[in-house]
Image (cartoon, grey):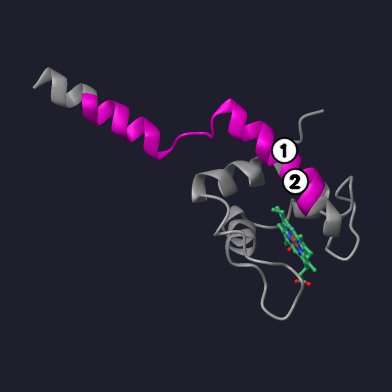
Amino acid sequence: MKKLLFLLFIYSSCLAAEPSLARQTELQNLLKNDCGACHGLLLQGGLGSPLQPKDLAQKSDEFLIDTITNGRKGTAMPPWKPFMTQDEITWLVSLLRNPIK
Ligand code: HEC
């Protein structure tokens, strides 16, 4: 029984896990290079809208996560679902809100 509880604990901690440190670095590079190609190197906007914390303050996590996951039809914003998990997208949104200085 103890063993089972332990396995459940490991399993549940994986479900809501933050990306590994290595993956976090990859995602930060992707944000700069890939997202930055449209949103501007400093995410101040370009072809894509600005993504600075102040620009996102009025928008909900659900809305932003949905935009990144599925893209926006009729605009250049592509869906990122094939390249990232939901946890990774959620982490990216929190990174956009609280950039690492
Ligand atoms: C090919 C260009 C392109 C790339 C690459 C791109 N975006 Fe976008 N993105 C856009 C455009 C254009 C919009 C605005 C869509 C609209 O007009 O509603 C947008 C909108 C968004 C929004 C919604 C902003 C808001 O204020 O509603 C978010 C969040 C976002 N992008 C995040 C990302 C992230 C994160 C990445 C990288 C993983 C990324 N984008 C890569 C073009 C791009």
Taking depth in this image into account, of 57 and 30 the one nearest to the observer is: 30
Cα–Cα gap, marks 1 and 2: 5 Å
Residue receiving disc 2: 31
> Mark 2 packing: few (<14 Cα in 10 Å), some, or many (20+)?
some
Taking depth in this image into account, of 62 and 32 the one nearest to the observer is: 32
Q: What residue is shown at x 65% (from left), y 67% (from top)?
A: 71
Q: What residue is shown at x 69% (from left), y 58% (from top)?
A: 59
Question: In which quadrant of the rendered image does the N terminus lie?
Answer: top left
**Can you give x and y, in whole percent of width and height, for residue 17 in the image?**
46, 34
**Can you give x and y, in whole percent of width and height, for residue 13 in the image?**
37, 31
> Mark 1 packing: few (<14 Cα in 10 Å), some, or many (20+)?
some
- Judged from the image, the secondary structure of the residue bearing numbered disc 1 is helix
Residue receiving disc 1: 28
Quarter assignment of residue 63: bottom right
Region of the chain picked out in magenta, as a range: 7-34
**Residue 93 is one of the magenta-drawn residues:** no
**Amino acid type, label 2:** Leu
- Please tell me whether the stretch drawn in magenta is mainly helix, strand or loop: helix
User: Looking at the image, in which quadrant does ligand 1 appear?
Assistant: bottom right
- Judged from the image, the secondary structure of the residue bearing numbered disc 2 is helix
Report if the CB atoms under discs 1 and 2 are less than 8 Å apart. yes
Single out the residue that lies furthest toward the bottom.
Answer: 74
**Residue 24 is one of the magenta-drawn residues:** yes
Left or right: 19, with 29 as reference point? left
